[in-house]
Image: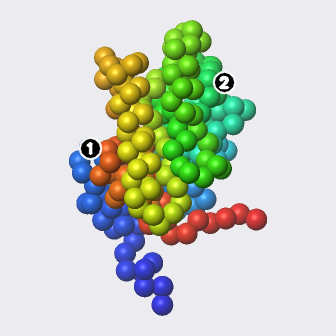
Amino acid sequence: MNILITMSNIGDKIASIKGQLPEQVRLVAVSKTKPIEDIQEAYDSGHRIFGENKALELRDKALVLPDNIHWHFIGHLQRNKVKFIAPFVKLIHAVDSLRLLKEIDKQAKANDRIISCLLQFHIASEEAKFGLNIAEASELLSSDEYKEMKNIKITGVMGMASNTFDTDLVRAEFKHLLNIFQSLRYKFFLDNIFYREISMGMSNDYQIAVQEGSTLVRIGSSIFGARNYKK
């Protein structure tokens, strides 16, 4: 009964996944909907990078958990919620507009911080996914408004592949994101040592993502089990 849960604890699962990752790939333990106790258990095992997709939930967890946790915001971020995570967040994965980036810069300045950000791209065949295309990203990065921002730092790109069993399609979508990353690097970030992150890959496809150049994999259910939905 419940063999998958009892055979190893959270720390063991994290160690097992990390053991499969190349040295240059970091694990974001997706702790959204999970209780403080589970995150503390993961922290006590030595893990430090956690991903949340709700601003208020991230804030509430950051206030009670250790200060040296690296909080990553991995979901779609509304501009009116940026102020709640600005004091705590280490990396925002899903910047999909200039307006959002401006708000992050504003709130980072208010907290005397520089917040690292990834540009999110729509690489999946599904319509529901958020994200920029290469033309929109180029327009953003060429804008005077972006060039005036002092409290954000673009460190790479992020994308979500289609939710499908078609591994060839998933691989092609990850290759597309790698091509976007490289294109932007040559055009805008050639001399920027901080531009180096490709956030792609989740519990069901991270092995393919790693093969295609991911530097950050976002894994939740393989560590913490199924999501705890509220209401």
- Please name the residue shown 36% across and 67% down the image: 13
Q: Which mark is residue 4?
A: none
For disc 1, the marked residue is: 24
Q: Compared to 20, does 199 lie above or below? A: above
Identified by mark 1, the residue type is Gln
The quadrant in which the C terminus is found is bottom right
Circle 1 packing at 10 Å, graded few (<14), some (14-19), many (20+), is: few
Q: Nearer the viewer, residue 7 or 140?
A: 140
**In this view, which residue lies farthest toward the bottom?**
1
Decide which of 124, 51 is in the foreground and name it. Answer: 124
Please tell me which residue is depicted at 45% across the width and 78% down the height of the picture: 5
Label 2 crowd (10 A; few <14 / some 14-19 / many >=20): some
Say which element carries label 2: helix
Left or right placement of residue 175 versus residue 132 in this view: left
Observer able to see residue 42: no
| Residue 86 left/right relative to 66 | right
Disc sitting over residue 99 in the figure: 2
